[in-house]
Amino acid sequence: MNRHSIPVVGQRHQPAAAVDYRDQEEPFVRPQPVRPPAGAPNVLLVMLDDVGFGAASAFGGPCRTPTADRLAADGVKYTRFHTTALCSPTRAATLTGRNHHSVGFGVIAEQATAAPGYNGTRPDSAATVARILQGNGYATGAFGKMHQTPTWEISEAGPFDRWPTREGFDRFYGFLGAESDQFSPVLYRDFTIVDPPATPAEGYHMSEDLTDRAMEWIESVSAMDPDKPWFCYLPFGACHAPLQVPDRYLDKYRGEFDHGWDRQREITLERQKRLGVVPPETELAPWAPDLPHWDELDEDQKTVSARLMELYAAFLEHTDDQVGRLVDRLQQLGMLDDTLVLYMLGDNGASAEGGMEGSFNYLAGLNGYKQTTAEVLERFDELGTPTSYPHYPASWAMALDTPYQWTKQAASHYGGTRNGLIAHWPKGITDTGGLRHQWHHCVDITPTILAAVGVPAPDTVDGVPQQPMEGVAMNYTFTDAAAPDRHTTQYFEIYGNRGIYDHGWTAVTLHRAPWLMATRGLTLPAFEEDRWELYDTTVDWSQARDLAAEHPEKLEELKEKFLVEAARYQVLPLDDRTVTRNAAPRDRPPHPLRGRTSITLYPHMNGLVEKAAPPMFNRSYVITAALTTGGRPCEGVLASLGGRFGGLALYVADSKPVFCYNFSGGGMTFVRPDVELTGGTREVRLEFVYDGGGIGRGGTAILSVDGVEVGRERIAETTRAIFSMNEQLDIGVNRGSPVCADIVGRFVFTGRLDHVRVDLPGEERPETVEARRRIALATH
């Protein structure tokens, strides 16, 4: 059987056929499905989100992770494992065995540009490990956060080539974006949006749901074909913001972080030394410039900051408990001994995207609206519940990345890239309970799985020649703790933050602080002005002592090596833009509208993610719903974009049309006329007239019924860039969280909704915009 080409085609010998079946002496051979090599294990790949090296108790952190501890005791724990410092890039590298820029994921999917290393489109020449295993006879399933499907392809028209079930997964259940509300997610099963099986009031939480679906799939596959091994990919949305946890976990860590982040770093480092995950001589790396120390906070700031960290710790423990439920089930089914479990405790370092003071609604921060401690205190008791969308302050990220410098996005330093990894496989790892100090990277995960299964990296997949694997299999470490490193050189780059590891040395430069994602008026230095640092990590584990001044020749050597690697793996041209990365026309990714200024949508369609929906930020727009009431009372959503933490909705309540604008920076504006829809009503229309003159400006919302204006309201400010990472533009129904309290549950329109048309007026001349603004103000 030639496994170097997928689909695998076996040699089949058929006897000569007789004229009459009665004379057929030698039986024909029935085609057999491809099977993996004998003894190939099941594979469970678990990936947590935004978990720093110093977060989990398995690596000395303050968050209790009993499942990670248990798997490490019966497996091996890797102390020098690395990611890319950002989510989509790590996922792409992990699942393909190639560097993230090599497969077009130098940045998250939503910020894709046309540059080959950043186009957000995995090439067919880099098949996923799921497709390789599927082609070798495995059952394959993915349950959770994918964040690799191009946003412009998430629509009814596709193409579907880079949806999970076309990338090698037989089954998919989860979400496609960067993050999700844990209580009210927008979920897909394969290609179709499905409702969560319960409501928040009924105790729903997405991490539990994902685990349930993974267990059910494994049970089903094994029941029908006990000899067929499976590959289960379980990438949780946790512990990415929002920090939302079930009620029973809300108070698990009360008071445990009142000592603050500076002391927590010291406590964590002491534990790490006792566990041996860092050497005894390890020092705390320097504190990040501009981040406050704990003793610089006032009492209110300490109260809020400690509470937000309590929620994060509870979130991580809850997620680890879900992994434990799955591990327990595998043990009950008699599968655990023959399952290779790879437990990645993070896809990057801890996130500093909560800003200096943390936030109640961290989506506001992504739009550049500063959240204050006072605002969080006003709704303190709601933190962690469905009505909050919180994130902790950036300084906690430094503590969660102990003992290293910096955080998520900082591909330069180990605080952004070093994560815990545990491998558990009783039939393949007999030297259990030990540590592995070999240097490895997430690009090594796919080669490791293929080596464990016993199949080669294919030369062709579905007729397409494949790029060479760029990772190095880690299996040599399973039985030899002292084996010399095999992954000896690796570049890093995210948002211009860059570095290179080479035989123990690291040269790194921090170009942009991670908490400056959406900072207005920010001016960054030219790349050639960046200051590079040099560390010898063979004696300085935590990159605490910069040797750039002592070894300038070594630094120049490594800087040159970075450029060589960058050219080799499509890192160039360097790009330090974040939220504005694809704003310019030449960088803008494709869009389903393809230049159209009008689109008609129907209630039977799946929703549209924001990046695929008509753009309704910083401009005028018109939403027109064609409907009939049948002369009966009616209610329900006509069109809704976003959700509880930012969005807009045109809907009917008590047979009256309503428009709500939920400003991400805080506050709602309603157009709520006292006009009932009648049996003769055919059209409800909302026109928003934007002031112009910049981003996030105000405008006037005008509501009409059958061409007659029935109400208007002034909206002082509008959201600048994004309502949500995972909510959608829905027609005739509400999915995910509601834009306002009037919308309860799905809130399906009870009349007949034929369609909704969205019109985007063309670019208007400045004087026309100003004239319309004056008219709107005068008639308000």
Image (cartoon, helix red, strand yellow):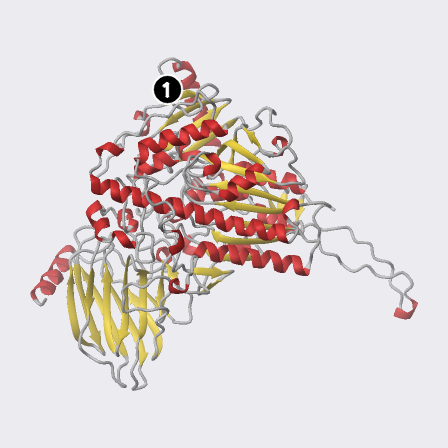
Question: For this rendering, which residue is in front, 5 or 684?
Answer: 684
Q: From the viewer's perspective, tell me whether residue 395 is left or right of residue 404.
A: left
**Quadrant in the rendering for residue 444:** top right
**Is residue 564 shown to the viewer in this render?**
no
Residue most toward the front? 255
Question: For this rendering, which residue is in front, 256 or 220?
Answer: 256
Classify 728 as above or below 35.
below
Q: Quadrant of the C terminus?
A: bottom left
Question: For this rendering, which residue is in front, 625 or 732?
Answer: 732
Q: From the viewer's perspective, tell me whether residue 718 is left or right of residue 533.
A: left
**Is residue 472 shown to the viewer in this render?**
yes
Question: Residue 287: image x %, image y %?
Answer: 31, 28
Amino acid at the residue labelled 1: Asp
Classify 389 as above or below 566.
below
**Quadrant in the rendering for residue 485:** top right
Secondary element under disc 1, as helix, strand or loop, is: loop
**Residue pictured at 64% horizontal, 36% vertical:** 429
Question: Residue 767: image x %, image y %?
Answer: 12, 57
**Residue pictured at 35% horizontal, 44% vertical:** 310
Question: Residue 296: image x %, image y %?
Answer: 22, 33
Question: Residue 60: image x %, image y %?
Answer: 45, 34
* Classed neighbour count for the residue bearing mark 1: other residues with Cα under 10 Å, few (<14), some (14–19), many (≥20): some
Classify 185 as above or below 415.
below
Residue identifier under label 1? 546
